[in-house]
Image (tube, grey):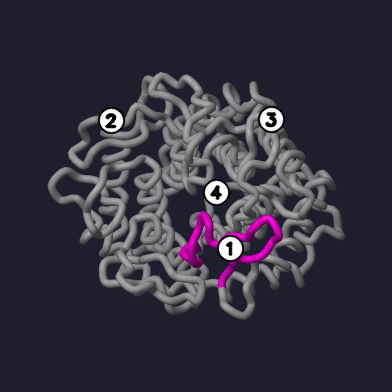
């Protein structure tokens, strides 16, 4: 796979832009440190404070571990102890010592989901690259849980969720959990050296993107029953759900597009066949999401969700959608060298800088309303470091290996 020739005027070639990315990453980290609680990491409010009664959650704990590992790998002081604190939480209140696996929060209630366990695997992988003492045992357990309970060899995808004791499997299959499974599997392939994880990631992508999304005009179908029959009316009465919204979610199209390119590069790097459809579908997903979601209601920005006629449904602008759009544009620009991706890369960063980056309150606003004013209908506060921090790191790196391994090996773009 020959790298495209870079345009000399590309922002990705400009020292000032690369410095800006680095500075923004350094600005984001101190805000996130406030999420530490006794049993892990919890959600922060919009001022960076812990709300009264804040509880450690698996999603925030694993994502903070991942991000603090990335900071530590880069040599940014002050994150090793936070990283180890998170790893301890995954052996403490969040670990189910009776049945195995991890609870969704420190109240230790609820079941076990593939979505959250994929983040455990990602966190363990990044901590392993960061050479933290507790990381290998955690990684071994995460792999064992995924293979025993979530991975379906027959389906070539992840099962969705179970009760605490692994009974009563949910009769549902989700694109979101499987998408983050692909992300985790790319990292697992790097830290274990086992290409089986790449082959599994490819099977997931083939089912959900090349089989379903490509047949729907490169619109990601999010919800399925246990037999992989699409459920287009799923959550019709809960359209703004933050994890399983009704309709299509353009942000996931961007995220999938980027992951397909990482998978393409990882397969090639491993000496394995990388199907051409990975690039074709990545381009298709990106184009479809931009065409239908950008300024869909007349105002700039990307709407959260669309109905099945590609009309704006939930018109909020979420920070993670724009973070994934800019990261996908950078990946497509790196893979293809085509000028259209440079245009989208600049446009998305300009929008983020103008509307999401909060230079007064810290971090990024997580949600804007249809008038691009801060809102909190879907996401309250500023709990998420993961999407914004990855958005400032990914454009500086090669498409493979995965993020933590690339940082450790200083595998920058060539």
Quarter of the figure with the C terminus: bottom right
Residue visible at 68% across and 54% down in the picture: 326
Give the SS element for disc 1. loop
Label whose residue precedes the other's in the sequence (3 or 1): 3
Instruction: Say few, some or many: other residues with alpha carbon within 10 Å of mark 2 (under 14 / 14 to 19 / 20 or more).
Output: some
Quote the CA–CA distance across marks 2 and 3.
32 Å
**Vertically, is 366 above or below 95?**
below
Quarter of the figure with the N terminus: top right
**Vertically, is 325 above or below 361?**
above
Label whose residue precedes the other's in the sequence (1 or 4): 1
Is the residue under label 2 in contact with that under label 1 (CB below 8 Å)? Answer: no
Label whose residue precedes the other's in the sequence (1 or 2): 2
Which residue is denoted by mark 4 in the rendering?
401
Instruction: Say few, some or many: other residues with alpha carbon within 10 Å of mark 3 (under 14 / 14 to 19 / 20 or more).
Output: few
Instruction: Say few, some or many: other residues with alpha carbon within 10 Å of mark 4 (under 14 / 14 to 19 / 20 or more).
Output: many
Quote the CA–CA distance across marks 1 and 2.
36 Å
Quote the CA–CA distance across marks 3 and 1.
26 Å
Q: Name the mark on residue 309.
A: 3
Residue visible at 64% across and 58% down in the picture: 369
Is the residue under label 4 in contact with that under label 1 (CB below 8 Å)? Answer: no
Is the residue under label 3 in contact with that under label 4 (CB below 8 Å)? Answer: no
Q: Is residue 372 magenta?
A: yes
Which residue is denoted by mark 2 in the rendering?
169
Q: Name the mark on residue 367.
A: none
Q: Position of residue 383 (x, y in %)?
A: 46, 64
Residue visible at 64% across and 54% down in the picture: 317
**Outermost residue, left side:** 98
Give the SS element for disc 2. loop
Label whose residue precedes the other's in the sequence (4 or 3): 3
Instruction: Say few, some or many: other residues with alpha carbon within 10 Å of mark 1 (under 14 / 14 to 19 / 20 or more).
Output: some
Q: Is residue 313 left or right of residue 349?
A: left
Which residue is denoted by mark 1 in the rendering?
375
């Amino acid at each position: 796979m020959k790298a495209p020739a870079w345009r000399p005027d590309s922002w990705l070639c400009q020292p000032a832009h690369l410095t800006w990315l680095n500075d923004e990453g350094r600005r984001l980290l101190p805000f996130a440190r406030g999420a530490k609680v006794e049993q892990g990491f919890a959600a922060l409010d919009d001022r960076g404070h812990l709300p009264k009664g804040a509880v450690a959650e698996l999603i925030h704990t694993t994502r903070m571990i991942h991000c603090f590992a990335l900071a530590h790998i880069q040599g940014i002081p002050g994150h090793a102890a936070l990283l180890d604190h998170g790893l301890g939480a995954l052996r403490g209140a969040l670990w189910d010592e009776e049945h195995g696996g991890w609870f969704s929060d420190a109240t230790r209630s609820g079941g076990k989901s593939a979505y959250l366990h994929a983040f455990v695997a990602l966190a363990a992988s990044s901590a392993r690259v960061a050479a933290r003492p507790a990381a290998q045992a955690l990684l071994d357990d995460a792999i064992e849980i995924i293979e025993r309970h979530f991975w379906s060899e027959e389906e070539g995808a992840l099962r969705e969720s179970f009760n605490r004791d692994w009974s009563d499997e949910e009769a549902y299959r989700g694109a979101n959990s499987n998408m983050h499974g692909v992300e985790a599997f790319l990292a697992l392939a790097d830290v274990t050296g086992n290409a089986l994880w790449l082959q599994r990631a490819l099977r997931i992508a083939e089912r959900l993107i090349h089989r379903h999304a490509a047949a729907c005009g490169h619109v990601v179908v999010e919800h399925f029953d246990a037999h992989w029959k699409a459920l287009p009316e799923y959550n019709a009465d809960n359209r703004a759900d933050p994890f399983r919204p009704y309709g299509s979610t353009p942000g996931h199209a961007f995220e999938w597009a980027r992951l397909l390119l990482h998978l393409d590069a990882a397969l090639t790097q491993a000496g394995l066949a990388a199907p051409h459809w990975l690039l074709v579908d990545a381009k298709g997903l990106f184009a479809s999401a931009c065409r239908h979601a950008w300024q869909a209601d007349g105002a700039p920005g990307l709407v959260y969700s669309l109905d099945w006629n590609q009309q704006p449904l939930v018109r909020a602008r979420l920070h993670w959608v724009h973070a994934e759009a800019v990261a996908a544009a950078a990946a497509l620009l790196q893979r293809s060298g085509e000028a259209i991706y440079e245009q989208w890369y600049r446009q998305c960063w300009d929008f983020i800088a103008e509307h999401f980056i909060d230079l007064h309150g810290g971090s990024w606003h997580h949600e804007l309303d249809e008038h691009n004013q801060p809102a909190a209908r879907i996401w309250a506060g500023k709990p998420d470091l993961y999407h914004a921090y990855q958005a400032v790191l990914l454009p500086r790196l090669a498409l493979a290996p995965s993020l933590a391994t690339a940082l450790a090996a200083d595998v920058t773009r060539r």
